[in-house]
Image: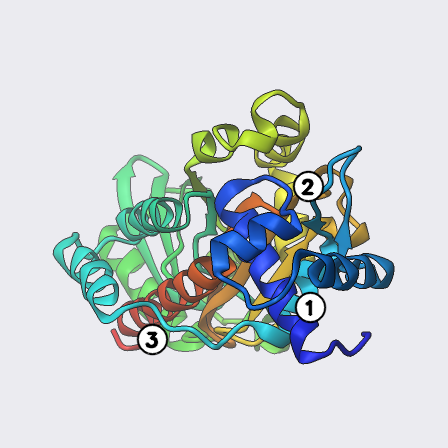
Amino acid sequence: MIELTERQKTLLLLIIRDHIESAKPASSQKLVEKFHLDLSPATIRNEMAALTEMGYLRQPHTSAGRVPTEEGYRYFVSQMMPNAELPEAVQHTISHQFHQSRADMDQWMTLAASILAHQSQGVSVITAPHAEQSRFKHVELISTQGRQVLMVLVFVGGEVSQQILTLAEPVTQERLSQTATRLNALLAGLAVDKFSSLATPSDPLDQDILTLILQDVRRTSESNSGEIYTDGLTNVLSEPEFAESDEARRALKIFEERSTLRDLLARSTTNTNIGGLQVLIGGEGEWEELRQCSMVIARYGVSGIATGTLGVLGPMRMSYTKTIPTVRYVAGLLSNLVNDTIVGE
């Protein structure tokens, strides 16, 4: 990354601020008048030309002004942006909204998506917390009629699986409850990869139910990637650079293709710790659909137990100084909620 002089840093910062606010190219005369600079327009033009040569600015079409490039925004985010916190009043409002809501994970996810979209004026995306590896917590066996039994499996992380079993012969509720008690003691807290080392139960019914539990746990482990919640799609469509182009629609198509969206979120946070942030600018050369957009993504949850991902998508000129601390703060809130409801129960 090319090192800039203090004057070049100041001008790049002001051009980015102006472009975020106006979505228009910044000219030297505009910068002097708007920010009351003690520099001549000619001096500013020379510095803008140098920043353009370095790859931090570009000149769209025949405009006399300049706009930041992907590299310009990357330099701003990595080198110039202060480690801003949300104002205390905003933190209090968001925290109050969560604590006023029902203690329900689905409602928390919906609320978090709404808050992120409103605060950032972008598109929010959140994956519900899911176990990094399915771990058994509890099984219930309930006699329904004849040979049919309802098996309810509960996993660490909150997932619940239910299925109707048809046994070889009718079994009393008392015997089903005894089997469930023995299996709960045998499997308590075990992850999928530990099941193969289990000793085979002596009771035939225990053996049959255990086989069905193992199948269900493995299936849940393979398919579980967390429900996706989104909000604020109209925010991006209303941005001026997207109003008369297909760029926004190309980006938003990712939100329709859930497998692509999951892949993007997973690959972006593979090496990210809980609470860590990733800022994707212009698709980072990997996602062509996002070449006019930026995403701020964070992981939340409790490592080794249950984690999820949240983020905001917006135009490349999004307000990073507002979006980044918002994503960071909501990620922290959700991590605390996961810890209190899943780990601390």
Where is residue 7 shown, x and y percent of the image? 66, 74
Residue pictured at 46% horizontal, 73% vertical: 305
Image quarter for residue 254?
A: top right
Image height of 167 relative to 159, above or below: above
Give the mark toward the camera: 3 or 1: 1
Image quarter hosting the N terminus: bottom right
| Tag nearer the camera, 2 or 1 | 1
The answer to whether the residue labelled 3 contacts the one labelled 1, judged by CB atoms less than 8 Å apart, is: no
- From the viewer's side, name the closer residue of 297 and 242: 242
Position of residue 146 in the picture relative to residue 34 (left or right): left
Q: What is the CA distance from the residue labelled 3 to the residue labelled 2?
A: 40 Å
Q: Position of residue 133 (x, y in %)?
A: 56, 67
**Residue where numbered disc 2 is placed:** 292
Return the disc, 2 or 1, that comes first in the chain's sequence: 1
Mark sitting on residue 333: none
Residue at the spot of label 3: 343
Q: At label 2, which amino acid type do we have?
A: Gln
Identify the residue under disc 1: 75
Which residue is at the front of the view, 338 or 5?
5
Residue 43, image x and y in percent?
A: 72, 63
Looking at this view, name the residue that lies furthest to the left: 100
Tell me the element at label 1.
helix
Q: Secondary structure at mark 3?
A: helix
Q: Amino acid at mark 1?
A: Tyr
